[in-house]
Image: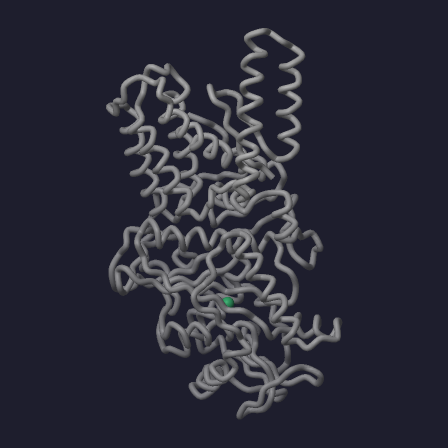
Amino acid sequence: MINVFPIFMRKLSHVCSLKPYKETKWLMPNGNPIGVYVYNCIANQKVPVILNDPKIATWYSCGPTVYDSAHIGHACCYVKLDILQRILKSFFNIKLVTAMGITDIDDKIIKKAKDTNTDFRVVAKNYEHEFWLDLTSLNVEKPMIITRVSDHIHTIQDFVKNLVDSNMAYITNDGSVYFDTSKFPSYGKLQNMQDSGEPTTTEKRNKMDFALWKGYKPGEPFWETSWGKGRPGWHIECSAMVSKVFGSQIDFHAGGIDLQFPHHENEEAQSCAYHDTRQWANYWIHVGHLNYKDIKMSKSLQNTLSIPDLLKMYTADTFRMACLMSNYRYSMEYSDEMMKTAEAVLNKFKFFLKDVLMYVNDSENGHGDYSNKLLEELQKVEENNLEALKSDFDTASCVNSLLNLVTCANKIIKGNTKDYYPVPVVLTAQYIINVLTKFGLTLQETSENTISNTLIDTIVEFRHMVRKNAMLRKDKELLSACDTVRDKMKMMKVQINDSNKTPTWVMTK
Ligand SMILES: [Zn+2]
């Protein structure tokens, strides 16, 4: 067993502490269980994923408010959501229809536009463009449907009007519209009641009421409605846009843990009221925070790291590996130590895959055989990993199992050369590649330039021949020169592994 797991990995239990669902406000949907259990904040436990159609699911993620560059807190959220979506698609064969909402009208965008003397639409457009570039650089799959608030003003207005007409919302003197929480008894089901953060105004009937529509303020963008001019409140946007795209029910609704309350609480309340249903989103998915030196990373605290800056230091694969090793629900403590550990784990897999090629293609090895206990181990890991993923997407435990599999296989590869088991070794390598690429890792070297790769191969092979001869002759001077080459290569991000008969190398960052 390898114990390379860092301090930031906390293993999730596969066993649910079962509380009857009837004791909670979560309603078990009718339909087809897919065998996956996911944590639900309303039930406060893992609940079975049940889909109307066993192979089709809808997924909406709350996107960013595009008023500034994204930071690694956003990267963590969207990479982890990307991993979950890939798992549903690749391991459980779910056809997932994904959508993301972009908030392109907001107080912060208006402020930024004023501060920079730019049209608010230009501010939003530029930062949204940057956001998609950042996600692409992190190998996050773009949602199939992108909804922007500015494109859905009429949908939002109709939604608000419907709530006013059904007496679930009221218009105030300043032209704002508030949701009346006293008319919705289940308000607070996502989290125990606390202050929503909405400003207390004398216009509000109840403390927890929240704005669906904000009355016009001079100098701000506005749209005309039957009750006066103004602009949408934040919470209503997602509800209206999701309803427009997916109708009266959605399977998965995701975002950072900070959105659980009040944003998602309000979304659920107003959507249930609008659709006259008791449960709108069946599965709320909340991603834990990324903390930096025990502090939540945020723009307001000025302690952020941009995604391009992150990728100058580490590859997207390394960051994704860190996300896989921490599980989606838990907070991640960002540090160089954490990233170096993730990089070491990733390199362990990369070296292994190269070592496998060397081993199976080595003609000096004995006759092939595949009756080896590695096959049994492989089968066990395949079964355990599927169970781990079924249990609230426990990726950390999968990575750990894969590392143990590498250790088992290395006993053959690096052990007695007369033991030649190409079949189990290749099957193990194939399984590892399969799982890691399904998680969204590219497993590619940083440089895709084949010429430079060939050049590195040549240098590494030449150094290996020189070093082998120097060791035979006990030529300290030549051996020292070989070490210098190795160290210089490392400085150029090429890490050479001398522990094999034939050396291998990987690119680091
Ligand atoms: Zn939202």
Task: Kindly indicate the quadrant of the structure image that contains residue 212.
Answer: bottom right
Query: Which one is in front, 421 or 264?
Result: 421
Q: Position of residue 391 (x, y in %)?
A: 35, 46
Can residue 399 be spotted in the picture? yes
User: Is 389 on the left or on the right of 218, as rendered?
Assistant: left
What residue do we see at 36% from left, 45% from top? 389
Number of dots carrying numbers: 0
Question: Is residue 349 shown left or right of residue 335?
Answer: left
Q: In which quarter of the image is residue 459?
A: top right
| Above-or-below relation of 47 to 174 | above
Q: In this view, does 85 lie to the left or right of 366?
A: right
Q: Measured from the top left, where is residue 99 in percent x and y?
A: 44, 66
- For the point 63% across and 9% down, the residue is 475
Front residue of 506/376: it is 506
Single out the residue that lies furthest toward the top: 473
Determine whether 76 is above or below 432 in the image.
Answer: below
Does residue 318 appear in the picture of this structure?
no
Q: Which of 249 and 86 is in front in this view?
A: 86
* Quadrant where the C terminus is found in the figure: top right
Instruction: Tell me the quadrant of the picture where the N terminus can be found.
Output: top left
Picture colour scheme? one colour
145 or 111: nearer the eye?
Answer: 145
The residue furthest bottom is 226
Residue for point 39% across, 62% down: 252
Residue 435 lies, in percent from the top left, at 38, 42
Measuring from the top left, give residue 464's x and y in whole percent. Answer: 54, 20
